[in-house]
Amino acid sequence: MKKEEVDQIIRAINSQKGSTCSHTMIVFLKNSFPNTSEQTLRSIYSQEVCRKMKFTHGRHKAKGAEYLKKYMEERSVGKSTLLTMAADLHFSPALLAKVILDAMACDSSEGTKTKCVTNKMLRDTSLIDDRILAQDVHLCVLSDDHYGPLSDSISHSFGQQYEHTLGLQLMEKQIPFLAEDQLRELGLDKTPDIKLEVPVAVDGFVIHWIESKALFGSEEWHDRFVKKQLSAYWNRFGPGLVIYWYDYVDTIKSMHEKHLMVANCLPPDIVMMDPLKRP
Amino acid sequence: MYANILDKTLSNEILPDDVENWLRSRNTTNKFLLEVNQIEFVIYFLSYLRGQANFLETKSSTTPSSTPVKGTHKPPSFTLDPDSYQGKPRRSCSRKLPLTSDNKNDHSSYDANDTQGRRKVQQNRPVPQSFNLASYIVTKTSQRERKNARANIKLDSNIEFPEIGSGKKRIKPVMISTPSKCQQQENQAPNPFTSAPEVSTSDVALERTLLKMECLKVQKKDMPKVCLDELTTLSRIYSSILNHDLELNFMNEVYFLTELLCVQIKPEEEKASEMFGNSRNCTFFAAKTLGSLKNFIEYLEPATLKLFCESVVLEEVCPEMVFKLRKILPAMQTRPSFNLNAVIGTQVENENRKNFSSPDSFQVYRKQRDTFYALLEAWDSERHFTKVLVKEVSAIFEWTPKEPENFAYFSRLFVSQLISSCIGDGLKGAAATPLQLQVDPVRLKKLQERLVTPAKALSGPCPPPEFSGWEEFFRDFIVIASNCSFNSHLQDAFVCRLHALNNSKFKYVELQSNVFSAEDETKAKFLACVLSAQLVAKFLGFLQFLPYRSMFKKLSEYIILEQLTIREKVNPVINTHDTLATAAKNCRLTVTVPWLCSYLVQMDIVTLRMPYVQSTISLLASLQRSLSCRALPGASMLLVRLNIGWCLTILGDACPSLFEAYRSVNNFQNILKAPKNPDYLDMLDSKSVSLVCPFVSELRSLLAGTAENVKGSLSIGSKHITPIAAESVDPALQLELQLEESFIQTQPSSVRQTLTFVTERLTSLNSDFLETDIINPTMHELDAQVQAKVRSEANCLDPNLEFSGKIASLKQKLAGWSSSTAEEQSAFLLEKCLKEANLFILNRCGSLLKQLLPRTVSEIQTNAFALIICKNICAKLKASIQTNHGLKTMQKRVKDCVEKTAKQIAKSAESVAKTDLNASMRLPADRKEPVHLESALSPAFTLISIKELILQMINLQPVAVSKIQSVFTAVERAICHRADLLPDAYFMFKPLTVDLAIWIVATQPETMTEDLTNNFCEVWSGPLGRPDQLDRVFCPRYMQLLCDSRPQKKSFTAFKTLLRGLLAANLLTPEGVEQQAIGVVRIEWPQEFLQMYKLLVEDICKDRPGSDGESFTALLPWLGDYCSDLDNLPGD
């Protein structure tokens, strides 16, 4: 996808002032960009939300006690729920729920509630003693498309789904590979989704491993992946391929071209090593 | 005395032949020569030549002079005192005798105090300078010489006092007869990439060449006969000295000759009385001497040779040399190819969790490795260590735990990456370049080097050691890290690698009896080994002697002795003397000498005074003297000679025993030659020499910089580099080779070694097998066939024909048949050999590899290895068969056989074709995954669908039962038929389905029928498993949902149905319900809710009247009563 097009989508997202629910935003984007797939639009929107949250999360987190107090006050007069509060603050509902739960844990005289317990509560709201808070947290987790355990599970499942699809496609093409868990069994410290047992070539580029990403490949995310993950694969196994299933912005192709090849699907014209081809 | 000898030789009183013989063998009958020491005469002679050519100092602005030579028209006085000899200031770096150097005690361009790792490139590099008056003040020339020199100063001379801007600006002739073009260009916008139109360069060059040649002829004719004879005599003596290793630094002498060759003296400055008083004499002498060194010169780098070939003077004076060089030039275009893998792949067998003392140390190593490569990347773009990078280097060694294995592994990675980056660097980019561009990686590397390396000034024939390109990164890394643990481990790693490289074995092939050679592959391996060892030794020296390096060039004798006393007690890391002696004994000088010299020149002043180093230097000097007795192949000889010369020149001053070693005469006749050892395998060529001895490029720079007498006007230094491959290689083939190389290179070293071993063994076995089973029988059959044919043809011949007539007739008749038979047999043999070899190798290769390779290597990889090995051996085999049993050989054999048989008759009145090796790379069979159905809804979509249903109910939108039931199916299928189900999603299904049930109860209770309850229970008792949330089915949130529901009664009824179902399906136990139910009343609830709750509890109690021993305890009835009591509370 061209950078101009991505910029246009981001501008459209930012043009929607106020709190817009995910569903409404996706419908709006689908209407505005009919040629772009829904998954791509969702992914770009999700990344944009995450980008904004990254800047504000710290600030909101620091105000946990204040928010808890405000929530309790408004709840006692039956005015507000966590969802409305999150909308007012332009903050992710699941993250707000977590901030509130954390603040409660800090307040707790027992002092036994830890971060782990908070996460457990987010995942299973039936563990929360406060029934109204439990219901609010439950609604926050349900309605958040970008953060929270449910959203994480869904995105991880999508990731796994595409990873599996990639494995199937490779098997179809008779390309032998080792999956992540097999590599882990070997005791490797860094494990790409797919480590090709025998390297292959795509467009004259030799590939030793493949990483599957069920999201849109923006410059920011790609760079982050390269720094945290992909460069480690490169320095261990050599050059590789990263697949952004929800497409990618064309500028990232040249960002680390020495080490990586970028695609939005498994390239059809894969050349396999065949020593018998040699004259 | 020496002056006398030389005078007598020049005046033919002593025959030059006698002098030459004396220099060669030290045997002479001449009474004058008997009286003098050979080496001291050599020293005198070389000084004499420098004295004669003193003007070079003033002429050459590019000379890396330190102390200029003063004008001496007569042979200078010479003392035999070695110290005074060494201290002679008259010799500059380029012209002085080998034992002096201005670089003494300053062997590295690195400043130890520069903690930021910045390089001081220019500081130690000789800066081009011209002759000046100050030189007269500081030198120790004799009074007489000084007077002469002063007398020679001419203020109006353009040489001593050149005009500003009167450098070497070239004026290109511009064709003025093309005004139209010029006018056109004037009208156009100026384009910086287009030059003014010129006359045809080739025409001008040709005219110039012809003119120069004519001038030379005239000049030669004009040259006085005496002068010509004297110069010839001098040249003969000089050649004898150089050809018999009597000089200490060959490079110095060749450089001096090249300077003479390029010299230009203006007519008004010519001095008739001097030997080198004019350009003609200089160039004649230089060309004549260089001509006699052609056996060495031909191993210089191709670009230098090209410039020598283009030298008009050389062509005129020594045409046979130029002819020889021109002949060998095209064959020198082969480039060495290095391993393209710039990144050191992870070594699974070593770098895994099991080989670290704790998971934490493994994590630290992981971080260290990643940061190191991030640093490499960042440095590559910056080409220096920025503040951020410096911090990152320090951070690498700050992570805890700092276990020894972390340092050891990291050091090993460091060494491997050092070799990969510095010897095969720049090629990683090429490897990633699309093949369609046809990029030549070697050219690309050159271009990259030019772009990132600052232009160098001329450094002279003996430049000090320096770190350039990627070496800077590694050097600065060591300095910035300044970590004693790392340094110790790194030193160990360097020593270990150095030992391994020094003891590398090289395969040889027996060509004839006692004549051995090496294959191209071995040659490449040898070169890589020599370069790697040189690099590792340089860094080992740098690391080891870094703490001893002083910022002062000279230390007082007291300090040196004090330090010596202490350090003499410490064992050296490398016993240089023994290593060198062993190398000399085993004929491995070409391997050991380059790295040993690199190591020695890194030593500090005190270390150089240590006895073991002194003895090493002495041994080096004596080796230099004995080289000609070893009869090494030309390139090997030159390589050793250049390296020792360079090293001794740099270290000369620090080693007082050098002069004695140089003078001492050993019994060189006892040197044993081992033709199978590296020195005699002739594994080097000119390119290798220039790679191992980079300073030889100084000659090229000198020639290119003063290319007045060279035909082409284009300076080599500014030659354009186009990184496009000249030869068109089949992209598919290139890609295949790249894939194979990449595949092999990413394997652990043990695997690679095994592959090499298997390849070598199988090649040998296969050769024996083919020779005995295929080639010999085929040849016998061919002979038999030819004999039968000849005999049958002979029967048809006229019996009356004479002997010779019969033979001629038979040969004529069988000419066509012979040719076609030879062709057929050649092809047949090749095909049969390849076919049999394929079978032979594959049958053995698979089983061998399975036994030898570690278990971590999969069957697919083993098969791929087997195929690659098979193909490689077959490729070699094909080349070997085509050479030894090719068409021409076969034709000759048939022809010989025909002739032989015909003679016999007359006297008595008389291949590995391709097998179907589709050992397909089978997919791994051990993948244990559920039967994946693509039609089943994926876990992600199942989660979304449940979420959507709940959201719909929250928004009070009715949900059809069928939709809910479809969720059950989806969950079941996602669990049973989706291989991409993550535990994360699996565990998310549980709370979500419980939530779904509660939301149904709360928002559309009528839907929660027994059937639906049963559906839920089936899922929870089936593939999904019992959710933990059922243990909290009475939790406050669910109760709150029931509390908020309207009408409450219906919701409670639905909840009751659900509970009944759960109890019936044993998903809940009465005890569990009892515990949960009690928990509800601990919280305050509205009265309405409590009433409904009471009814719920009562109903459950009724339903479970205590049958089957699973009855509710008395607590539930009590709870019912308690809730009833709540109804009767006052105030309600």
Image (cartoon, rainbow, N blue to C red):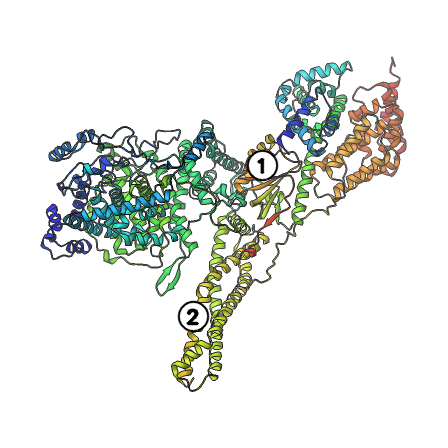
* Letter of the chain that mark 2 sits on in the rendering: B
Residue visible at 40% across and 59% down in the picture: B508
- Visible residue check, residue B248: no
Q: Which of the numbered marks, if any, corresponds to residue B296?
A: none
* Local SS, label 2: helix
Q: Quadrant of residue A140?
A: top right
Do badges 2 and 1 share one subunit? no
* Local SS, label 1: helix
Tell me: B766 left or right of B246.
right
Comparing B106 with B1089, the one in front is B106
Instruction: Tell me: residue B1126, above or below residue B570.
Output: above
Comparing B286 with A243, the one in front is B286
Q: Which of the numbered marks, if any, corresponds to residue A253?
A: 1
Q: Amino acid at mark 2?
A: Lys
Tell me: B297 left or right of A128.
left
Residue visible at 73% across and 43% down in the picture: B978
Q: Position of residue B682 (x, y in %)?
A: 35, 55
Q: Amino acid at mark 1?
A: Lys
Residue visible at 44% across and 63% down in the picture: B883
Comparing B712 with B907, the one in front is B712
* Letter of the chain that mark 1 sits on in the rendering: A
Q: Position of residue A111 (x, y in %)?
A: 65, 22
Instruction: Tell me: residue B119, above or below residue A91.
Output: below
Count of numbered circles in the view: 2
Instruction: Tell me: residue A133, above or below residue B177.
Output: above
Q: Which residue in the protein does label 2 denote? A: B892
